[in-house]
Each structure stands twice: as structure tokens, then as C-alpha cells.
Image (spheres, coloured by chain):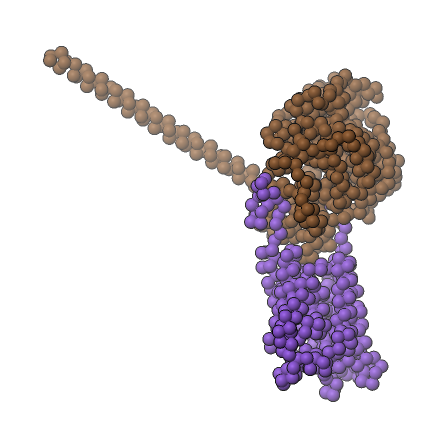
Amino acid sequence: MNARDPSLFVRLRRRLQRWGAHPEARKYPAADTAITAIPLPPTLTLPLAQHIGAPAQPVVRAGDRVLRGQLIAQGAGKVSAPLHAPTSGTVVGIVDVPVPHPSKLPAPALIIACDGLDEACPAEGADPFTLSPGEIAQRVADAGIVGLGGATFPSAVKLSLGRDQPIPTLILNGGECEPYLSCDDRLMQERAGQVVDGARIILRAIGGERALIGVESNKPAAIAALREAAGGHADVRVVPVPSRYPMGSEKQLIAWLTGREVPSEGRSADIGVMVHNVATAAAIHRAIRHGEPLTSRIVTVAGGTVRTPRNLEVRIGTPISALVAFCGGLTATPTRLVMGGPMMGVAVDSLEIPVIKASGGVLALGPDEVAAPDASAACIRCGACVGACPIGLLPLEIAARIRGDDLPGSAALGLKDCIGCGTCAFVCPSRIPLVQYFNHAKGELAARERDRLRQESIRELVQARAARMEREAREKAEAAARRKAEREKAKAAAARKPEEVSA
Amino acid sequence: MKAVFASPHAHGARPVGQVMLLVMAALVPATFNGFWHFGWPAIFLWLTTILACLLAESLALQVAGRAIRPALADGSAVLTGWLLAISLPPWAPWWIGALGGAFAIIVCKQAFGGLGQNLFNPAMAARVVLLISFPLEMTRWVAPAVFGSVHAPDFLAALDITFGAGIPDALSSATILDYVRSEVSRGVGVGQALDASFKPLASSLGSRAGSLGETGALLLAGGGIFLIATRVIGARIPIGFLLGVAVPAALAHALAPQAYLPPLAHLLTGGVTLGAFFIATDYVTSPSTPLGQWLFGLGCGLLTWIIRSWGAYPEGVAFAILLMNAATPLIDHYTRPRIFGRRRDGRSLSPQES
Ligand code: SF4
Ligand code: SF4
């Protein structure tokens, strides 16, 4: 499996493909603003589950004083990530707080009262090219780095995949195809060196041959900055990709850049590709070179009701009210608050929700920026959703099955392959809440599957117990028979002996 | 429970009502051309048919106990009436339009469950039912009588034509397809019959006997191209339709020029342009998969040509579209796109294949 460029045929074919949509970008004025750090808030709220996998386990207690960068909760298990104090202060305790999650259920979080000194604990960087791949992965794991594009999968888990199979191609995702968001754009412009160095560190960790940085063509400044930073490195290449939603989806970006599709029941490593977000690469650079754990991120604050939209560098755990206040506050009550982008972000109810590792955007949207889905609308079968789906699904048919309560039918049409990108709902003239249907059905199907597995394991347990009892009974009977036989043999021997004597 | 707003939070499509408005806008030139050539009776018939559709829709919604206003506001009933009206003989009596409109809405649309549920295009289904039930009224064509010309009926005479005594016998005429077919059956060659009746440019701008709006074939095509350009409809079905008619017509005409019409005559007469751009592209009754749309368009065209060439009727567009409508669920089923990361048969790609 070598790192190859797509053939001419693949290039032609991908030009003919018409999936996706072109939502209004609305990246300005925020995209023109340089990244600005905001002042420390009085308290930070750090949910223990900011990543995919098991929640982190606190290693500090109420009353403890902590320093910036100090471990406050450690990863629990193979897929997990630790948390570090974003500034110095005192641990207040662990409380259940609202978090940006679609379920809207509160989750436990560590609260830190900041002391304003921002005292750091000593950190030590290293030259990645003197470290072994395993050591790089370990340091990335210890730094609490997760996918910053929103997926929040622990990055170190991905890095160690390189040990099991060859992964010649690293792709850095600089797509940022969500409207409004420009945090990655600014990062690539202002810290291109960190991104390129991060790419080279990852290449070393996975034993890759080349890194492709895919950037949507609507970010010429980012492309130019990255090209300059990558100048001396033959193994890093910046490749512009068309601006089209969802080009920043992992599968779509891989397909565009390499011409290969990630198998539906596989992962990208199976075809020799690994994808990391550009911000993740920059975080890896800082973790390895400077020993800095992940305690801050760049957030785009935008939307029609924000007075001065801009890009901010924010400590994890800062309430979004502080971000909004730094942007001059709101001009009107927003119709909807969204964490993340407008296509896949999560609607939240309050400004007191904290920024977490996944938060690339805080959007305060006005009435004319928000979709009003209509659950009672009829599908006019226009087929717009079919043409738009990047996965080649038939959203209208899947939704019809779900509306008719035929969940197995929806699964048979490929619901499991749906990446939830929302392109179908975006282009639907009837404004049918397609993604809402799909999420509901996916949840329901997963619950049924869990239920089935539980039933199965119970049945297996019962069967195993019956088999064990049967085996034990048989063994008992056999043992009894053996003893009986021995007794009889002994008796017979005893009966024979006198004859021998007499003989 | 707090309200849950599912993503996406943005929306970027024209609402349904706007889609319907654009389709109507695209119909305006051909319709006005029809009014110009066929005068007041055409206007009366057009109004009657649309009104009948609106009334029928309100009635059906009332009976079903559903909200009337939003359903009427989406414009689909008006559009159905409009499409039916321009496919009728322009001087047909009012009750043809009224009956057809009511039938289209009540039987062909609402009985199936309303917008989005019907199998057959309501306008074409109504047209065919009218043709079968009232063959006389549905085949009484008139030669164009441009507004203000000697033959053009004035307002009162027009009222009498649409709502009263009907068409004065002296004025009836035949469509090009009718004429050619009867000439050919008398032993006259296609070429000669066509020369006598078909002038490509004039004929396709409305100077011929025919349905209210269909005679402006070039105007309809223009409207259709406008709809493709504004992305209201896709290009696959119309292109497929036109090719489906033109390719077999060209082959047959090349082999037997005296027995088969040339492709241009096929494309510019009858309802081919109306069908290809406005009827076959009806979202509800056509396939939603890309490959399915090609097949559907080609099928409509081919069937049209077959019916015109060998069928019992001189015109075949409506029948062809209805037949393909019936096949649509099947086409959709067998032309599902390949899912990303999977093979055609639905199994996951292996790393080597992908
Ligand atoms: S949300 Fe799912 S069905 Fe809709 S476009 Fe995206 S992948 Fe396709
Ligand atoms: S886009 Fe909406 S209305 Fe059109 S086919 Fe899909 S679900 Fe139906």
C-alpha cells in the first residue's frame, strides 16, 4: 500500500460528482480578525467527558491548589483523555453542570476558582525526532489531546494505529466547510509553522511517508501561509480542495485527496490513511515541543446578534458568556445559540455553558439565520436530498421508513452509513427535519441492538449454566460409576486371592 | 422538557411555494402565446380549469379534516390546473376543464394521500381520462385565430363557445399529427403531408391547431431551460425525453422516410416539449435517483414515439408519461445509488477494492 496520487481517471470522476451543498459561507467579519486571547474568567468549568470514550477520573480534591498545566483528571481506560488545569487556582469541587450535548443532560465537571496569577507548572519539551513513535503517542496521550475538529476522539489512540498497520498518508483536515467558522482558517494563517511541524511529528509517530494538508479553496491566505511554512519539507504538501459542504468530512476529504473510499465497515487506516484536524496538529506540536497540555483552543464567535464577531483564544472551561461579552455583547436576543457550526453544531439553552475541547464556534443566530423545520410537511419527492447526500443515500426513502415506524427498513437503506452531515435537510424545500429522524432512528436501533445483545448474553449464560450443571451431573455419575467399578474390581481381586493361595 | 433543535440550524432551499411559482412563471410565455392564438375561449377554459382545481382541493382537504390554507398556498393545485388547461383543446367547453380539474385533484392526487403521494401525474391522468371519456370534445381542434383577426371570436361569442353552444363547425381543424396520420392512411407520403402542414418555426411558435399551450413548443422549451438554469428541475429527464423521441425517429425516418416523421417534426409538434420539461419532470411522479431519471426520461420519449408511430392515437405523450409514472417505484428501487464505502450489492468494500 503506497501513497499514490489519484489517477487522471479519478480526478475526472471527482469533478463530475455533484454531492454536497453550498451554504452561504458567512465567514466574515470574523475571518478577518486576528486570534485574540481573552482575559481569565473568575471560574472555569471542566466537564470530565470532553472526548469520546470513558470520562476522565479526577485526581484532585476540593480545596487543592492547582497550577496551569497540572493534571486534574486522568484518562480512564484505553479510549479516554486526561484533563489539565487551564490556569492556576483552587479546586472548588465536582458538580453536575449543563454541557453542550444534544441530550441536554447535565454531566459532572470540575470547577476551578481562578486566582488570576496564571502560574504554570514546569513543562519540558523535546525534539520529536529523538523520540520513538511510542513515546510521541504517550506524550500526546498525556497532554489530553483530542480531535479538535469536533470529533474529540483521543488523538493518541489514533497515533498508535500506526504500529499495527502501515499508514503511508497523513491528511490534515483544513477544510472548515461549516459556515461562520474561521478558527482553523486563522490558525493556519497565523500559526502555519505549528501546523506543519505538527504534521511532521504525526508522520514520525505513525511512520507515514507524506502529509497532505487539504484546505478549501476559499481560504487563499491560509493556503499561502501553509505553503510557505511547508517550503523546506518535501513530505508535506498543501492541496486546495473545492469549497463545498461537507468537504471537511473525513471520508469525503480522503476520497477527494486520494481517490479511495473508506470501507463502510472499516476505518481509514485500512486504506493507509489517517486524518487529523489542523488544530489538533498544532496542539500536538505544542505538546511535544513545549510540553504544553491542551488547555485552550481557538473559538469563532459569530452570528447575526453578536456585536463584533471575532476569533478568540480561550481557556477550556470558560463560560460562553465571557466570550460573547468580549465581543461587545449581543445586539438582540438570539433566536438560537449554537456550539459548533450551523450544520452539525449543538443548540444550547444558556450562555453559562463552558467552552470544551470540541467547541470551535459559539453562534448567536438571529431569526433570519435559523432554519424552521416543519415536521408535518409532505415530501414532494424532489430528489434534492438524493443529489446532495455525500454518501449516496436516499434520505427521502429512509425518512419515509422512519415516519412509517419501519426501522429495520431504514437500516436496510443504509442509515448506519449516514454521517449526520445535514446536507439533505439543508437542501430540502419542504424543510423536513431529516437529520432529526435519522438521529432518532439511529438511537432507537442502537438501543434495540444493545437489548438484543443483552438478551443473547443472558441466553448464553443460561445455556452455559445448564451445560455446566449437566456436565457436573455427568461427571458425578461417571465418578460414581468409576468408584463402583473400582470397588468391584477390588472385591473380585479379593475373591481371587485365596484361589491363588490355594493354587 | 426543553425544546430540542436538531441540526442543521441553517437552511438553504427554496420553499415549495416558490418552486411552484417559478414553474408557473416558466409557463407564462407559452400560455400567453396560447391566449394570443386562440383568444377568449382559451382564457375562459384556463380560468375554469384552475378554479376547479382550487375548489376541488379545498373540498378534499375539508373532507379529510386538514388545514386548507397552507395546502392551497403551496400552489400545487393551481399548477396542476394550469398544466391540465394548456394541454386541452383551447375551445373545449367549460365542463371539460371543470371535470378534468376536479378529477385531477380529487381522484389523482388527494385520493392517494395528497401532495407527494400520488403515483400518476394528475394533469396527465385527467387528460387521458377526458380523452377516453369524451373523445369528441377532446379532439375538436381549431385553427389559430389571432386576437383581432376576422375569425377571432369577440368576448360574447367566446362566452358562447366555452359556456354555451360550442365550436361552430366551420372553424374546426386538425392537428399536424392528426393530419399526417390521416393523410398517410389515405396513401399520401409523410413528406408530402408534412410539407402541407408543418412549418418548423411558425408551427413551433403557435401557428397551428393544437392544445391551448402546447403549440408554443419553442416557448415551452425556453421556459424549461429557464427552470433548468434556476435548478428547479434537473436536466436528465428532459434530455432523456427528447433523445428518446429523436433518436428512434431519426433512425426510422432514415430507413423509411415516407412512413415515419422526421425527428424535428416529432419534437416540435404535439406535447413533447410540454411533457419533457413540465410534466415528466414532476417531482412526485418521477424517479429521484440520477440513473432512474435518465431511464425515466428515455422511456417517456421512446414510448411517445412508439405510440405516435404505431399506436391507436396520433399523440402519445400523456400515455407515455403515465406508463412511466407507473414504473417509477420500480425504477427507483433498482437504480439506488451505490453507498459510499460499499459495493453495489450493499456489502462493505474491502481495503483492496476501495
Ligand atoms: S445527514 Fe446522512 S443522509 Fe443526510 S446528507 Fe448527510 S449523510 Fe446523507
Ligand atoms: S429534499 Fe425533502 S422534499 Fe425533496 S425529496 Fe428529499 S425529503 Fe423529499
In the picture, measured across the screen, residue B346 lies left or right of residue B204, that is: left
Q: Is residue A106 above or below residue B56?
A: above
Q: Nearer the viewer, residue A242 or B27?
A: A242
Task: Provide residue A356's location: percent of width, then percent of height.
Answer: 74, 31
In the picture, measured across the screen, residue B227 lies left or right of residue B117, that is: right
x 70%, y 51%: residue? A16
In the picture, measured across the screen, residue B94 lies left or right of residue B354, that is: right
| Quarter holding residue A52 | top right
x 69%, y 49%: residue? A12
Q: Is residue B270 above or below residue A247?
A: below
Q: Is residue A9 above or below residue A464?
A: below
x 67%, y 68%: residue? B246
On the question of residue A365 being in view, the answer is: no
Task: Provide residue A114's location: percent of width, then percent of height.
Answer: 80, 22
Q: Which chain is brown?
A: A
| Location of the N terminus of chain A (image quadrant) | top right
Task: Provide residue A503's location: percent of width, then percent of height.
Answer: 11, 13
Task: Provide residue B202's location: percent of width, then percent of height.
Answer: 78, 76
Q: Which chain is purple?
A: B
x 25%, y 22%: residue? A485
| Quarter holding residue B266 | bottom right
Q: Is residue A429 above or below residue B310?
A: above
On the question of residue A261 being in view, the answer is: yes
Extreme residue in the top direction: A501
